[in-house]
Image (cartoon, helix red, strand yellow):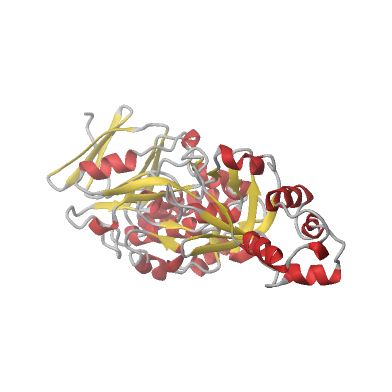
């Protein structure tokens, strides 16, 4: 190994969490090496939100994050809140707007968020610190001895008393994502909760092929799996189900479980009887077509198999159809995997980490932040808020 460069901390991963951690530590006067195998920083930031980066949510309570320990995220999230990041965005004069459900996006480009974080790294010099970037060179050796971490990358090497694992999870492998964080964590004695794709489309089997003919059709629904329920749009695809409601539900779904979808969540109980009274000569496909996309209405009417005028149908049959539409069962065969997953659920077990500092309990100087950790937020800016909050929490302890 070459003569090592010396730093106060080495941050592995120049994504959202790593950039925030490095910038914050640098502004605290620390000399930080920020290392990433990618040629450019913040690659997932750049593609997020359709290129406009859903950088946070107005509200980010811990209840909207999944983890084997649902209390773990509370400390970091309470100490760096959405309004704190909004203030940072405003200080860089980045225009933004709010979409549905508290989701905040750049008016311009996600590149503005990456540029902001890099500018924050540069500010370290004014505080007596420094953030040194090394991009395009993967870590090929990571060791710990005598209270220091040593790392080799390219033709260089470095050492520091602190190492921050911020390399994320394996979601979106085409962006270079891997399970490197888990391998490294295990090597240093940390356990890993089985990683799985989250915020990901669900697939359907051959018996539900009729719905796959609806590819491209979307409609507002309430999707349910166990106690989890989300009221947003669902999208039928050539493989199964997607859209915000389904992506949200996918984080709670487990193989073998069924889901239910209320296809008409705005309709009150008894609406089909009311239609019968008001339009006795109407057909089910017609009344459904007034409330749903035409292609979907046609498929549902065919599945429900209620032919003829509503006025000639028994109320019990209408009630049964109404119940089916309010809780249409689907049996997903799986997901579209890490290739289409927006994030990874599971990851480095929180039991081995301090919720205040993100530091490994058994190995001082080792920190784990962001998506690499077993904390997964809802769709809508929550995972970025966890990246900012966990990155700040670790930096405060470096």
Q: Which one is in front, 289 or 171?
A: 289
Q: Residue at x 18, y 52 (%)?
A: 363
Q: Does 263 appear above or below 157?
A: below
Q: Which one is in front, 276 or 396?
A: 276
Whether residue 94 is visible here, answered yes or no, is no
Rendered location of residue 207, percent (x, y): 58, 40
Q: Residue at x 56, y 44 (%)?
A: 46
Q: Does 263 appear above or below 159?
A: below
Rendered location of residue 269, percent (x, y): 67, 72
Q: Quadrant of the N terminus?
A: top left
Q: Is residue 270 left or right of residue 329?
A: right
In the image as oriented, which residue stretches furthest toward the left? Answer: 146
- Residue 106 image-quadrant placement: bottom right
Rendered location of residue 216, percent (x, y): 70, 43
Q: Residue at x 21, y 49 (%)?
A: 161
- Residue 211 image-quadrant placement: top right
Q: Residue at x 46, y 50 (%)?
A: 16
Rendered location of residue 54, percent (x, y): 57, 55
């Amino acid at each position: 190994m070459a003569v090592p460069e010396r730093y106060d901390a080495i941050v592995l991963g120049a994504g959202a969490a790593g950039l925030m951690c490095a910038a914050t530590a640098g502004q605290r006067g620390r000399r930080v090496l920020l290392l990433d195998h990618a040629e450019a920083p913040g690659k997932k930031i750049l593609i997020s939100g359709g290129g406009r980066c859903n950088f946070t949510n107005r509200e980010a309570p811990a209840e909207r994050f999944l983890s084997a320990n649902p209390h773990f995220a509370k400390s970091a999230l309470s100490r760096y809140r959405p309004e704190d990041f909004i203030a940072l965005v405003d200080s860089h004069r980045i225009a933004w707007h709010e979409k549905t459900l508290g989701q905040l996006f750049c008016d311009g480009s996600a590149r503005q968020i990456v540029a902001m974080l890099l500018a924050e790294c540069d500010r370290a010099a004014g505080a007596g610190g420094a953030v040194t970037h090394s991009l395009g060179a993967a870590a090929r050796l990571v060791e710990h001895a005598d209270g220091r971490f040593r790392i080799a990358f390219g033709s260089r090497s470095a050492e520091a008393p602190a190492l921050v694992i911020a390399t994320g999870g394996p979601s979106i492998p085409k962006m270079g994502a891997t399970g490197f964080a888990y391998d490294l964590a295990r090597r240093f004695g940390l356990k890993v909760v089985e990683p799985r794709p989250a915020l990901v489309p669900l697939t359907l089997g051959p018996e539900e092929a009729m719905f796959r003919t609806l590819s491209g059709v979307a409609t507002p629904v309430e999707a349910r799996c166990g106690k989890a329920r989300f009221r947003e749009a669902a999208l039928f695809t050539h493989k199964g189900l997607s859209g915000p409601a389904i992506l949200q539900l996918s984080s709670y779904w487990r193989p073998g479980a069924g889901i239910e979808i209320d296809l008409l969540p705005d309709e009150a109980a008894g609406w089909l009887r009311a239609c019968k009274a008001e339009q006795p000569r109407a057909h089910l496909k017609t009344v459904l077509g007034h409330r749903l996309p035409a292609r979907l209405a046609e498929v549902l009417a065919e599945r429900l198999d209620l032919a003829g005028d509503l006025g000639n149908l028994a109320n019990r049959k209408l009630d049964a159809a109404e119940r089916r539409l309010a809780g249409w069962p689907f049996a997903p065969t799986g997901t579209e995997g890490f290739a289409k997953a927006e994030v990874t659920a599971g990851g480095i077990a929180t039991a081995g980490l301090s919720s205040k500092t993100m530091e490994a309990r058994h190995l001082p100087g080792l920190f784990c932040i962001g998506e690499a950790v077993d904390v997964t937020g809802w769709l809508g800016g929550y995972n970025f808020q966890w990246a900012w909050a966990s990155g700040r929490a670790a930096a405060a302890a470096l």
